[in-house]
Structures are given as structure tokens and as C-alpha cells.
Amino acid sequence: MTKKQRVSIVLEKLEEKFGKPKCALNYNTPFELLVAVILSAQCTDVRVNMVTKEMFKKVNTPEQFAALSLPDIEDMIRSTGFFRNKAKNIKQCSEQILNEFNGQIPQEMNELTKLAGVGRKTANVVRGEIWGLADGITVDTHVRRISNLLGLTKETDPLKIEKDLMKIVPHESWIDFSHYIILQGRDKCIARRPKCDECEINIACKHYEKLLKEREKEKIK
């Protein structure tokens, strides 16, 4: 089975399972999504949604965050982890949006990644979710791990994984592919306790192929 065939099966099976996927982070404006994605680094979406639910009632614009002190921001986001660095990025990012982009989040990848705390992953999420734009494929911890298990890449570096995936995932599915893999990573392909036998895409998984072969060897013994 080729990598493109594996991708085709993955997309077909997970579309049947999840329907049209959507971002797991809750937001009402593009800026709220940007802040939420910055907070999601090394933190679960569930925790981020808990934090932003209360925080966005008080502050939810670049102007409001830019006016806050770092300690004030830190106190609101403390439970997301790495809160000092995230607070600094959110404040600086807000100031950049106001001073360099007339209060609007830039759409272009090269401009968006100039913002503090915004790398390719964050930019891909925001561009795909808000404007339906896809210059690349979002590679988070789920996508990195599961793409290797499926046999779609042997790389460990997110940028190299993204380049590998862009060659085999149809362009029109770049946004959905990441959503599907993330959803499957939370449901069946769980890092610490994967449910391989129950997984809807195990037919396209290199790791599962190896697992079955190992079981056959054990039977022979």
C-alpha cells in the first residue's frame, strides 16, 4: 500500500466517523482563536477552553491585553502551564497587531509568523480555521506521532513531517487531515493506551501491521 493510498483510507474512514471536523478550541473572534492557540502549547484544549471561558469575559481584544500588566495576564492563564512565556507572547503579540497591523490579524503566513508566540503550527490553525487558507498542514503532537505510526513519514521534526505530508495529502484536505488525526488521537490512537484493535484506520497503519505480524510470531512459538 502506498502512502497516498493510506492517506486516502484515513480521510475516508475518519470523515465517515467524525463528519466535517472543526477546531476543538472555543472562540468568537479571530483574535480569541489566536490567543487560545498560543495557550494550547503543552496544554490540553479542554484546559484552554476552561481558562478562556472566564478570561474572554473580561478581556478579549488586542487593546485590552496590551493594556494589562504581565502579572495580570499570568494570573489568568497560570493553569495552562508555561504561563510566564505565554503571557509575554500574548501581550507582545497584541501590541504588534495594534502597532504594525492596524489592529487586524494579518492573513499572510510570513506576516502572521512575525507575531510573538506564533509559529507555523499556530499560523496554520488560524489561517485554516478563520479564512480557509492552507499553505501547509498543522503538525501538533498527535499529528507528529500518528503520522509516524501510520507510516506516512519517518521524520520527527514538525517542519519535515509537514513537508512529507504535503506531498501525499490532497491540498483540499490539508486542513481537515490535521483535525481528523487530532480527533483520532484523542479517541483511539491514545499515546499511552492506544486502542489499535478498535481503531477505524488500523487497515492503513504500518504500526498495526507490525503488531499483527508480532502476534503471529508469538502464536508460532
Image (spheres, rainbow, N blue to C red):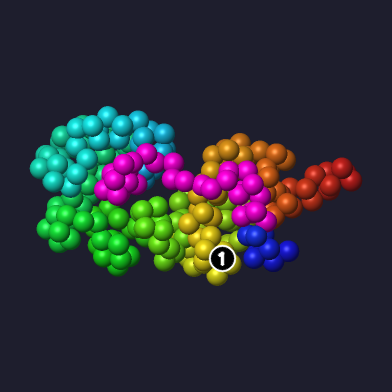
Estimate the x, y position of residue 213 in percent, counting from the top left: 79, 51
Q: Is residue 151 visible?
A: no
Q: SS of the residue at dot 1?
A: loop
Residue 137 lies left or right of residue 18; in this view the side is: left
Residue at screen point 33% across, 65% down: 109
**What type is the residue that disc 1 sits on?**
Pro
Residue 177 position (above or below residue 28): below
Residue at screen point 56% across, 65% down: 170
Q: In which quarter of the view is residue 165 placed?
A: bottom right
Residue 23 position (above or below residue 164): above
Residue 221 lies left or right of residue 4; in this view the side is: right
Q: In which quarter of the view is residue 35 placed?
A: top left
Residue at screen point 66% across, 38% down: 195
Estimate the x, y position of residue 112 in percent, counting from the top left: 28, 61
Looking at the rendered image, the quarter that the N terminus falls into is bottom right
Q: Is residue 86 visible?
A: yes
Give the residue at the far bottom of this rendering: 167
Viewer-proximal residue, 50 or 132? 132
Residue numbers of the magenta segment:
9-38
Residue at screen point 67% across, 56% down: 9
Residue 55 position (above or below residue 150): above
Name the residue carrying label 1: 170
